[in-house]
Amino acid sequence: MESTSTNNQSGRTYADFRVLYLVLQLIGCTLLILMLCWVFVYLGGLSWSSQPRIQFNWHPLLMTLGMVYLYGNSILVYRGLRYARKRSLKISHASIFGTIMLLAIIAAWAVYDSHVLVDPPIPNLYSLHSWIGLIAIILFICQWICGFFSFLYPIIPPQQREQFMPYHVYFGLAGFGASTAAALLGLCEKTIFKLGGEYSQLPSEAVMVNMIGVLILTFAALVLYLATNRHFRRIPLPEDTILLTGHDE
Ligand code: HEM
């Protein structure tokens, strides 16, 4: 009797999770579509180093795709795809991280070129946005390296792996928070550079940028809620107990 009510309870909890996860994906996709519209309708589209000012546009586009949308999704991969084998989830988690790293490198390259290839050149790493952005990228890289060698191809004993897990979770969430803050600061900075005094007249471009900002914040808040609510934890599957190595993954 008690176990039936526990099962019902956990079924309801998972249904709540699925609704919120769906809302999260809708917010994330809307965010990416609006970012594409901003880039193509207002910022002049995309190009590479022959037009450094336009090359810049890869930066917000790829950073939002990688360091916000995919980062949030990689954090939630264990809860979102809870019925998959743990080993597959670990590989997905690490692969999404690898993709984000690649996107972040291209995005950083685009903004660097857009600073040094223009005449006169623009100094690098002077703004609060660039400092917070750099912190987010460094945290992200450290996380990826430590996570890779602790959980995917472990070089440390299981007991230390277990002790390291809370730090991995904490720094993952902190890095995601820093990345969201950087995205919001970057949006604000670029809009002020571009619109100047016109920003306060709230033209259509400003409305669009403000909406992107609100969606980034909502997306991040929902990721943090879904990732930290203990009722939404993935319950280990019997198959997670490894057949080949004979120990629990
Ligand atoms: C989400 C994660 C983001 C990260 C980690 C990030 C990181 C960075 C870094 C490290 C720089 C310095 C590059 C240099 O000085 O050569 C930079 C520059 C810049 N970023 Fe971002 N960025 C992000 C998102 C955005 C977004 C969404 C925008 C919106 C347009 C943006 C706008 C800018 C601008 C205007 C610059 C050049 C001016 C400056 O250095 O502050 N960034 N970003």
Image (cartoon, helix red, strand yellow):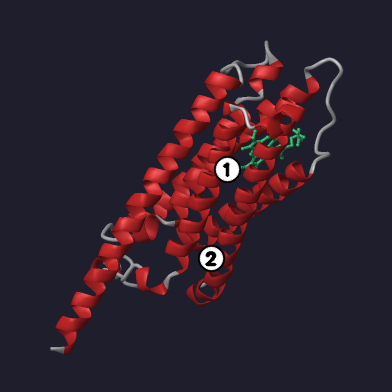
Residue 118 picture quarter: top right
Q: 10 Å neighbourhood of mark 2: few (<14), some, or many (≥20)?
A: some
Which residue, given by chain and number where applicable, does mark 2 sit on? 169
Which dot marks residue 142? Answer: none
The residue furthest front is: 201
Q: Is residue 230 shown above or below 54? A: below
The residue furthest top is: 50
Residue 226 picture quarter: bottom left
The Cα–Cα distance between marks 1 and 2, rounded to whole angstroms, is 25 Å
The residue furthest left is: 1
Residue 224 left/right relative to 80:
right
Residue 34 left/right relative to 26:
right
The amino acid sitting under disc 1 is Gly
On the image, the x and y values in percent for residue 144 come to 56, 53
Residue 86 picture quarter: bottom left
The amino acid sitting under disc 2 is Val
Which residue, given by chain and number where applicable, does mark 1 sit on? 213
Q: Is residue 131 shown above or below 156? A: above
In the rendered image, is residue 90 in sight? yes
On the image, the x and y values in percent for residue 90 come to 41, 56
